[in-house]
Image (cartoon, grey):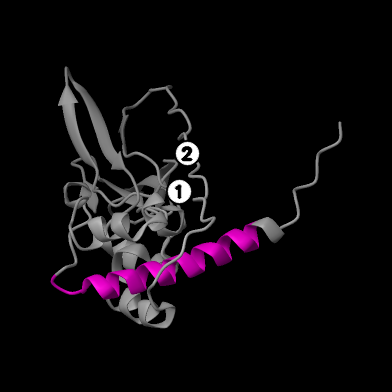
Amino acid sequence: GAMATAGGLVFQGSAEGELAAYDAASGKKLWRHKTGNGVIAAPMTYEIKGEQYVALLVGAGGAAQAAATGLSPPWPRAPGRLMVFKLGATATAPAHKIAEIPPVDLTGVTSAGNVKRGLAVFHRNCTGCHGAAASIPWLADLKRSQMLRTAEDWKSVVIDGVRSSRGMPSLARFVTPAEAEDIRAYVLSIAREAQAQAQAKPAPAKKTP
């Protein structure tokens, strides 16, 4: 979204992580600020005691970015942030603290589901939010989910809807319990593949003084 002001400026945030001000008449970019994360919200402005402020909610996400991950920068999952600007301000925002989610221990974990059927059911019902590889920056990384460890935990989310209050509704209208286990079998297979690839990567070289 964009915001035009009476002073002849147009402010707009971008998915690339920038707030910019443009000349409303020529379109020339006059000012920019790196926001540290993608922007999908429109800026707004207000005045307090004669001073004008521009406020912007910063955060990447939403259904469009989840469904078209290749069209947006791969921002890490980070909390939303409200950034407020005014003329002459000198404060700087601290860097985002990105929590690293450790791989789930899949030792001894098995599934009675069918991986090939799970692939088909997953892509029919799940890719719109979780991406083709079951992992996008803005939602839960299914390949690192503790729910993968047991069929009961997985069913409680996919069928029973225990995470509905956190945005993951039950898929019972579209997926049978057997198909849910097929999905789990598929996600288990690609989780193990991702872990194997990570272990095969050489360790980064140590910097010498």
Amino acid at pointer 2 = Ile
Residue 141 covered by magenta stretch: no
* Residue picked out by circle 2: 98
The answer to whether any part of residue 209 appears in the image is yes
The crowding category of the residue bearing disc 2, from other C-alpha atoms within 10 Å (few below 14, some 14 to 19, many at least 20), is few
Residue 9 percent location from the top left of the image: 28, 45
Range covered by the magenta-colored residues: 173-198
Q: Secondary structure at mark 1?
A: loop
Above or below 49: residue 34: below
The answer to whether any part of residue 132 appears in the image is no
Above or below 204: residue 118: below
Q: Which residue is rendered at x = 35% and y = 81% of the image?
A: 120
Dominant secondary-structure state across the stretch colored magenta: helix
Marks 2/1 in contact by CB < 8 Å: the verdict is yes
Q: Which mark is residue 76?
A: 1
Q: Which residue is rendered at x = 26% and y = 35% of the image?
A: 55
Q: Nearer the viewer, residue 96 or 192?
A: 192
Quadrant for the C terminus, please.
top right
Q: Which residue is rendered at x = 42% and y = 72% of the image?
A: 186
Residue 135 percent location from the top left of the image: 43, 60
Amino acid at pointer 1 = Pro
